[in-house]
Image (cartoon, coloured by chain):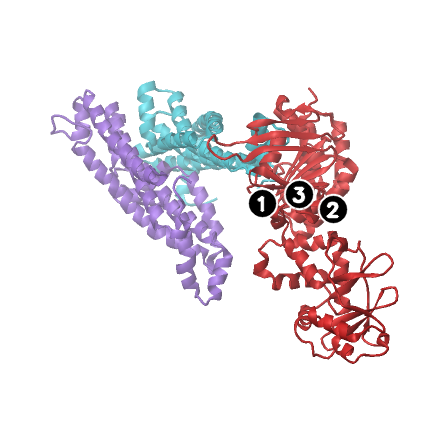
């Protein structure tokens, strides 16, 4: 590749630390996937339960919006202080951060289903549940998916901060580099952490894009 | 109360309630020496939610956010506009792609990397904050200008307006709501990411939170965190009002719609 | 599953004092609506927007629940059937089709049969039939999505979907309202063709009186609170509007059609100066002047109209009047429509046509102003406001072959210019 000493050093560093890089990357992926799984179910459920009422959805959106204003490492710190070390507080924090984009897009998506379409679905004898499952959710799905992608990006980045409070993930490399600034491998460590997180974020995004291709009807694809 | 009045009055009411509540909550906690040090400094005998160190941190936080925001506006909007000009239209997708990829980068990584590259200089936190929050402003500017109906531009050109006049009188005014939405997003992002400046000696409320975490003093941690969150809500509220009154009359949305 | 209503044939719908009130203190949207809709007929609810016609229709499939009253469908109370089941047996077509955007055309059409859990083979066969029924190529369109179709095609699919489970009833809510006039016209005709094959009980809602007249076996004109202003066959409504409201609602466009429905026997014939060869000219001229006319009509021995003689020619007191003036181009009888009478008037150039009995004997005259009066009777705006302009314009529209200027000249000549040479003003 390059003959620059930094780059050469970087690849050597990656090679030497391959095991821990992969281990932490796996931890990062795992904690994000778990959190997103929970947040997706919870977020869509919250959206479905509240979208018919403007007041209820406003409350849910305000509350989930407040989570986002809370500085992430403070929330992680608080949860850690209360629950002790472990994956649980990190997952809870990530779920809370992921909720807003998912709930917001679910509510918006469900609300935006054409009234004429809904009326005719009612008119041909679909029950409320059938309308939700066969009409509203499929039609809202592209927007919900966009919310999931948005939330995933957010959560992958916040998971990097979790390392500061002993969470799993590639953030460890960033904070390790920070604590040994000026040291031989500080920059390498930071780059590995940052780049690793970017790659994971892009991989998740690509995965969700593929999911979209597979699941969004051609009739409503943008 | 009309929805508009509600949107105008409820947030400040909530903010004041939270600030007062925070004071009494911290007041009711047992603050040991370490906590007092963190909040009020080593010379102080006691501390409360708004002791000296906290106020200093708030000031630093506001400076971090304020200066970065100004730089973000000065860079983001002109670049966004430039990219939509006929000569540079090819760059628009590049900007969009960059903006999306930028979102994937962890802000903590950018911050620490900037320090690793440039050293612990006082401007380094600003660099990281700007890089991270300029993207939504740029992207919204591009999208806002692009979303202007080509027929309107055509009509304006047909009336004899120059390209510059079309930009100033038609495209920008119509794009203002979208651009403002981007600015609002950027501001919220800035308040949040500014808490991370503490890791690179940038000051701000992150210092208080970090002291709390490092020393395992929950009241300190909570004090910093709640203030940062309140600051974000406050700035969002102000930005919301600005969004309402800066948008061209014909485009203003009714509140609660 | 309980078969709420048998599929296949049509059933009668009986609305009994149906009232819909949205709020206790608000006036009802539909008030005491009673109507029997015979099986197998197209009944059109027509009225201005907001008159409650859609609400009335939507109570039939319980998209709107009546506040009071009963709706019997095929002899059974609709309120006692399970709502979703009821709806699956009532086809429903709305404006802009309301197709499910994420499903293909085929999936859209198959929605109801699937809800009804038909077996695969039956669904496939039925879908093919439906493509054929609405005139679409199954191969070409089955896999397409609604947004890939034109408005007209979407509406065809909408009709196919509504008919999918072969429901005895079809409710159509302004289904062609959003289409361009040509497509609308074509789809209306196709609906009639389809109806001839399927014979459903169709309730059709529109605000377009022309559409109502074209499609309806029966037309129900509604006014606010869905009160029935008039109901009947289209020609009954056109020929005898029950009141000012109906007349106003029928409006100018339909007035043209009304000329087809009014016959000479419906008019009061006007007296006209006539004479036979050998009669006293002074008497005729006096009569012409008294009636402020230009012509007198020469009759033969059996009182059959022969020729028009201008007053100037009468002054000459010709000994052989049969070689003077111009021949009578046509006559009308009791059953001639006003539309055809007007054709005669305009081609004769006199603005007058003689009406004769079965033996050809002269009864009286029909004048152009009677045609315009008939048109005015059905005009939306008060007659006074457009007494001059509207009839002229309408006449020109009807004939489509006579220039507006000719008609104006025609009338001007009749009214004033007695001295103008004959032929000059005649087109």
Is label 2 on the same chain as label 1?
Answer: yes
Badge 2 or badge 3: first in the primary sequence? 3
- The residue tagged with tag 1: helix, strand or loop? loop
Q: Is residue B54 visible?
A: yes
Residue to which mark 3 is pinned: C154
Q: CA distance from mark 2 to mark 3?
A: 16 Å
Tell me if label 2 and label 3 are in contact, CB under 8 Å. no
Which mark is drawn over residue C189? 2
- Name the subunit of mark 2: C
Badge 2 or badge 1: first in the primary sequence? 1
Q: Residue at x 32, y 19 (%)?
A: A82
Name the quadrant of the C terminus of chain A.
top right
Q: Residue at x 76, y 72 (%)?
A: C283
Badge 3 or badge 1: first in the primary sequence? 1
Is label 3 on the same chain as label 1?
Answer: yes
- The residue tagged with tag 2: helix, strand or loop? helix
User: Residue A152: x percent and y percent?
Assistant: 46, 33
């Amino acid at each position: 590749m390059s003959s620059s000493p930094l780059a050469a050093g970087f690849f050597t560093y990656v090679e030497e630390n391959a095991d821990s890089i992969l281990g932490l990357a796996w931890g990062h992926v795992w904690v994000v996937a778990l959190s997103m799984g929970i947040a997706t179910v919870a977020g869509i459920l919250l959206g479905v339960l509240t979208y018919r009422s403007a007041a209820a959805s406003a409350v849910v959106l305000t509350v989930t919006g407040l989570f986002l204003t809370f500085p992430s490492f403070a929330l992680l710190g608080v949860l850690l202080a209360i629950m002790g070390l472990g994956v649980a507080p990190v997952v809870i924090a990530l779920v809370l951060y992921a909720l807003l984009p998912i709930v917001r897009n679910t509510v918006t998506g469900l609300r935006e289903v054409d009234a004429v379409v809904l009326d005719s679905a009612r008119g041909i004898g679909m029950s409320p549940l059938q309308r939700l499952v066969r009409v509203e959710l499929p039609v809202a799905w592209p927007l919900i998916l966009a919310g999931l992608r948005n939330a995933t990006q957010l959560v992958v980045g916040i998971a990097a901060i979790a390392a500061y409070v002993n969470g799993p993930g590639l953030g460890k490399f960033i904070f390790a580099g920070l604590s040994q600034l000026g040291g031989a491998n500080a920059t390498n460590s930071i780059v590995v952490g940052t780049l690793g997180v970017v790659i994971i974020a892009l991989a998740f995004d690509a995965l969700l894009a593929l999911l979209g291709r597979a699941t969004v009807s051609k009739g409503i694809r943008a | 109360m009309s929805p508009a009045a509600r949107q105008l009055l409820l947030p400040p009411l909530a903010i004041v309630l939270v600030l007062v509540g925070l004071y009494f909550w911290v007041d009711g906690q047992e603050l040991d020496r370490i906590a007092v040090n963190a909040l009020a400094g080593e010379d102080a005998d006691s501390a409360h939610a708004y002791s000296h160190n906290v106020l200093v941190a708030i000031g630093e936080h506001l400076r971090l956010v304020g200066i970065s925001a100004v730089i973000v506006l000065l860079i983001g909007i002109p670049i966004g506009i430039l990219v939509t000009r006929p000569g540079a239209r090819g760059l628009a997708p590049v900007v969009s792609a960059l903006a999306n990829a930028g979102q994937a980068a962890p802000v903590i990584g950018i911050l620490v990397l900037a320090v690793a590259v440039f050293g612990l200089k006082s401007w380094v936190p600003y660099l990281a904050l700007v890089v991270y929050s300029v993207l939504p402003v740029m992207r919204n500017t591009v999208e806002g200008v692009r979303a202007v109906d080509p027929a309107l531009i055509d009509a304006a050109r047909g009336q004899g307006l120059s390209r510059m006049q079309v930009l100033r009188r038609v495209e920008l005014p119509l794009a203002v709501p979208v651009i403002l939405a981007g600015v609002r997003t950027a501001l919220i992002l800035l308040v949040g990411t500014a808490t991370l400046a503490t890791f690179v000696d940038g000051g701000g409320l992150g210092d208080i939170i970090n002291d709390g975490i490092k020393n395992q003093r929950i009241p300190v941690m909570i004090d910093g965190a709640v203030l940062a969150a309140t600051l974000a809500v406050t700035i969002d509220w102000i930005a919301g009002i600005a969004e309402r009154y800066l948008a061209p009359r014909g485009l203003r949305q009714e509140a609660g719609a | 599953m309980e078969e709420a209503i048998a599929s296949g044939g049509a059933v009668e719908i009986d609305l009994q004092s149906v009232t819909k009130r949205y709020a206790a203190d608000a006036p009802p949207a539909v008030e005491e609506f009673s109507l029997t809709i015979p099986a197998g007929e197209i009944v059109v609810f027509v009225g201005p927007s907001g008159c409650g016609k859609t609400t009335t229709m939507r109570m039939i499939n319980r998209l709107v629940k009546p506040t009071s009253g009963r709706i019997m469908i095929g002899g059974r109370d609709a309120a006692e059937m399970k709502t979703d089941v009821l709806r699956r047996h009532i086809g429903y077509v709305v404006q802009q089709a309301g197709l499910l955007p994420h499903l293909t055309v085929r999936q859209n059409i198959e929605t109801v049969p699937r809800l009804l859990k038909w077996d695969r083979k039956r669904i496939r066969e039925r879908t093919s039939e439906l493509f054929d029924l609405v005139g679409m190529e199954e191969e070409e369109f089955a896999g397409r999505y609604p947004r890939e179709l034109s408005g007209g095609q979407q509406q065809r699919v909408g009709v196919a979907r509504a008919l999918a489970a072969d429901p005895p009833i079809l409710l159509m809510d302004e289904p062609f309202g959003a289409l361009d006039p040509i497509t609308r016209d074509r789809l209306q005709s196709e609906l009639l063709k389809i109806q001839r094959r399927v014979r459903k009980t169709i309730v059709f809602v529109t605000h377009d009186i022309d559409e109502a007249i074209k499609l309806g076996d029966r037309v129900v004109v509604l006014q606010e609170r869905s009160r029935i202003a008039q109901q009947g066959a289209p020609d009954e409504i056109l020929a005898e509007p029950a009141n000012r409201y109906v007349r106003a609602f029928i409006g100018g466009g339909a007035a043209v059609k009304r000329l087809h429905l009014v016959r000479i026997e419906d008019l009061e014939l006007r007296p006209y100066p006539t004479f036979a060869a050998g009669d006293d000219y002074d008497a005729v001229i006096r009569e012409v002047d008294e009636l402020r006319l230009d012509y007198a009509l020469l009759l033969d021995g059996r009182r059959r109209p022969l020729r028009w003689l201008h007053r100037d020619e009468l002054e000459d007191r010709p000994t052989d009047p049969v070689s003077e003036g111009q021949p009578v181009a046509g006559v009308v009888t009791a059953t001639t429509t006003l539309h055809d009478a007007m054709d005669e008037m305009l081609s004769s150039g006199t603005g007058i046509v003689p009406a004769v009995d079965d033996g050809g004997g002269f009864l009286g005259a029909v004048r152009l102003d009677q045609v315009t009066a008939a048109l005015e009777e059905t005009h939306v705006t008060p007659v006074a406001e457009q007494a001059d302009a509207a009839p002229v314009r309408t006449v020109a529209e009807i004939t489509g072959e006579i220039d507006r200027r000719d008609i104006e000249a025609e009338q001007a000549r009749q009214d004033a210019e007695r001295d103008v040479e004959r032929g000059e003003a005649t087109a």
